[in-house]
Image (cartoon, grey):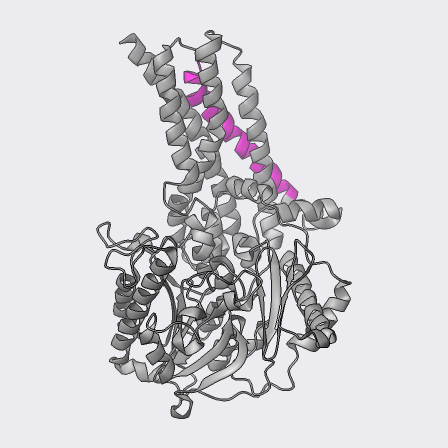
């Protein structure tokens, strides 16, 4: 019984210390809330912000318990006696002081900059003496002093009323100590990671509203700041020339078009818009794009009904970059990904904001965890009112390794869209065609090889999408609807013969169909090179938005568009136009692939220079956000 009492007392100590850190996080959130209360549109969101924010609060507290747990184990296994209580006090005091000043700095910076404290703010402050201090006046200093007083009073009394009470050494058996270590390690790891799903805990996990201020209340300031400090927003790897020279090449040779006249391909200026982003479907499995037969037969039928772009190229090789390319028209950044940096991607204009500002109902449907790659935060901060993902489906719902099956999500999306009372913009992002290419039903092409499993999940995706669109066609609102289908990125499968320096790796489907498409454009096949970056400018122009807000995007139906696409991976980048392609290997620092004849070396070098300038400017823009 004595041992059990000691066990319970030690558990109480760790719980008390755990909730001490949680208390400081809640205190920080409360202080922050008072400063932004007037900016929160729906006051009931405040309660949700505190509830959602507990995920990161618990994660931070778990990080800060790691060292005390290790010390506890060492003390009970090797020291076997009490040590000075100042060891714990110094540890708690140092971290408490750091957190207190982060709270103060965060309040001051957010009031002036509209973003939480970050490495960017620290770097700017260190680089320029007035970088941070210029935003702080006397009133802010008084607020800071008041906040420090409240913070330290709260910390002092909580620590002495709860933590100190149980911070006493009591002998314990070796076995019970090992058990405490195992149980504690599992508990801390679980809360640090945020569970055992594929997506680890990140800021996006606590985003819940289209009110960005409410989301910022939910985000744990300390957790976010520490994570930001440990990330490396690298210096540009694309320094090939003077930046001004690169900007001139991009502006005069790549982005400029003769005029802004476009072909009007829709019968209405207020269409319903369904944007389907297919996970990893490459052009090599589309017969109509020069690929294999019978893998995507249904989508061939859909292509024949509308406008099909036969030479469309993805911006990059991964989903996080593809999502930004499709929805924001922003090119890939090689070793970086802007969606990982919430303060950066919040400043990035995106198509959802255009539709939201025009009074559209906006939504995003995905069977996986929308926190993955910060997709959820990106949606909520860019005009998407409703996010439906894995958590919105019952536990017993049919799922693959990545989440709810696409046909189940499609059914939910269809039911929801039938209820919409105003024009809608809805995004459907599929997932079954992601590795490991799992299917609960039969594999059309078997699964003996990765390539065959890929073909099989592609066939599933093809059938699922056709069924979804077939149901949409039967609705009265289909006549006022345009559907856009593309892929987030290409793939190495099924042929496994194209490296990341080859344009074939990035060749993706892109087609438009629907009742809102004018009759004369149905069945049109466009053979010129286009980029998935061009989708946003096209959609914006469809509803009278400002397509010019998307610097790197041009209308797919512009009469004098430049037929060019850029593609990018961590170690290579390239360019393709109607005549040629060229790519550059960043590790080898030379040309890795080109279709330009040897006798036209001047043309090759000119194209390569354009690609170098393009990515130098893109990365510079990324660093500025």
Does residue 214 lie above or below 427 as drawn? above
Q: Which of 161 and 500 is in front in this view?
A: 500
The residue furthest top is: 81
Q: How many badges with numbers are in the image?
A: 0
Q: Is residue 103 left or right of residue 379?
A: right
Magenta-drawn stretch, dominant element (helix, strand or loop) = helix
- Residue under the point 54% across and 58% down: 345
Does residue 538 lie above or below 136 as drawn? below
Question: Looking at the figure, which quarter contains the N terminus?
Answer: top left
The answer to whether residue 185 is visible is yes
Q: Nearer the viewer, residue 526 or 292?
A: 292
Q: In the image, residue 155 lies at what x, y percent? A: 50, 28
Question: Looking at the figure, which quarter contains the C terminus?
Answer: bottom right
The answer to whether residue 543 is visible is no
Q: In the image, residue 448 lies at what x, y percent? A: 32, 54
Say whether residue 4 is magenta.
no
Q: Is residue 386 left or right of residue 330?
A: left
Q: Which of 110 and 272 is in front in this view?
A: 272
- Residue under the point 45% across and 26% down: 158
The residue furthest front is: 598
Say whether residue 155 is magenta.
yes
Q: In the image, residue 262 lies at what x, y percent? A: 54, 87
- Residue under the point 29% across and 73% down: 466
Q: In this view, does 138 lie to the left or right of 61?
A: right
The residue furthest left is: 396
Magenta residues, start to end: 141-168
Does residue 610 lie above or below 334 as drawn? below
Q: In the image, residue 423 lies at what x, y percent? A: 36, 77
Q: In this view, does 549 lie to the left or right of 4?
A: right
């Amino acid at each position: 019984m004595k041992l059990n009492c000691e066990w319970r007392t030690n558990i109480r100590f760790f719980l008390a210390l755990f909730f001490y850190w949680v208390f400081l996080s809640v205190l920080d959130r409360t202080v922050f809330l008072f400063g932004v209360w007037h900016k929160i549109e729906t006051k009931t969101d405040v309660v949700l912000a505190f509830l959602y924010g507990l995920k990161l609060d618990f994660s931070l507290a778990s990080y800060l318990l790691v060292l005390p747990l290790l010390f506890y184990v060492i003390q009970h296994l090797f020291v076997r006696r009490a040590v000075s209580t100042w060891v714990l006090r110094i540890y708690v005091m140092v971290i408490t002081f750091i957190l207190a000043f982060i709270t103060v700095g965060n309040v001051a910076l957010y009031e002036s900059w509209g973003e939480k404290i970050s490495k960017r703010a620290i770097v700017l402050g260190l680089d320029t003496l007035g970088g941070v201090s210029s935003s702080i006046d006397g009133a802010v200093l008084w607020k800071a002093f008041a906040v420090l007083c409240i913070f330290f009073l709260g910390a002092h009394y909580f620590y002495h009323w709860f933590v100190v009470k149980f911070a006493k050494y009591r002998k314990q058996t070796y076995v019970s100590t090992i058990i405490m270590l195992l149980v504690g390690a599992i508990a801390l790891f679980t809360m640090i990671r945020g569970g055992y799903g594929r997506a680890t805990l990140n800021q996006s996990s606590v985003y819940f509203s289209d009110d960005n201020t409410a989301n910022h209340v939910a985000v744990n300031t300390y957790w976010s700041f520490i994570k930001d400090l440990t990330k490396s927003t690298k210096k540009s790897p694309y320094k090939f020339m003077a930046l001004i020279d690169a900007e001139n090449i991009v502006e005069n040779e790549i982005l400029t078009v003769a005029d802004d006249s476009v072909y009007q391909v829709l019968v209405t200026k207020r269409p319903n818009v369904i944007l389907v982003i297919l996970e990893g479907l490459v052009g090599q499995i589309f017969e109509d794009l020069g690929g294999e037969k019978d893998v995507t037969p249904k989508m061939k039928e859909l292509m024949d009904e509308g406008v099909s772009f036969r030479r469309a190229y993805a911006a990059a090789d991964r989903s996080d970059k593809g999502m930004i390319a499709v929805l924001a028209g922003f090119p890939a950044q090689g070793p970086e990904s802007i969606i990982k940096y919430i303060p950066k991607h919040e400043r990035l204009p995106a198509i959802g904001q255009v539709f939201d500002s025009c009074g559209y109902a906006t939504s995003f449907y995905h069977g996986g965890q929308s926190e993955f790659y910060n997709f959820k935060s990106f949606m909520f901060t860019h005009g998407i009112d409703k996010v439906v993902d894995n958590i919105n489906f019952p536990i017993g719902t049919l799922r693959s390794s990545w989440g709810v099956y696409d046909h189940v999500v499609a059914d939910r999306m269809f039911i929801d869209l039938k209820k919409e009372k105003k024009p809608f913009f809805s995004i459907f992002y599929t997932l079954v065609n992601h590795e490991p290419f799992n299917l609960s039903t039969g594999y059309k092409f078997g699964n003996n090889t990765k390539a065959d499993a890929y073909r099989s999940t592609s066939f599933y995706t093809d059938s699922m999408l056709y069924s979804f669109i077939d149901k949409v066609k039967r609705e009265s609102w289909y006549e006022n609807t345009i559907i856009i289908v593309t892929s987030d990125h290409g793939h190495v499968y099924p042929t496994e013969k194209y490296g990341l320096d080859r344009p074939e790796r990035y060749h993706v489907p892109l087609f438009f169909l629907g009742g809102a498409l004018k009759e004369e454009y149905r069945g049109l096949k466009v053979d010129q090179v286009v980029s998935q970056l061009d989708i946003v400018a096209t959609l914006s122009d469809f509803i009278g938005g400002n397509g010019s807000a998307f610097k790197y995007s041009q209308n797919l139906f512009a009469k004098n568009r430049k037929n060019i696409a850029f593609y990018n991976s961590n170690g290579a980048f390239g360019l393709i136009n109607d005549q040629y392609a060229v790519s550059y290997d960043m590790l080898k620092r030379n040309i890795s692939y080109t279709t330009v004849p040897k006798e036209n070396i001047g043309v090759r070098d000119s194209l390569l220079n354009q690609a170098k300038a393009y990515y130098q400017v893109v990365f510079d823009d990324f660093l500025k956000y």
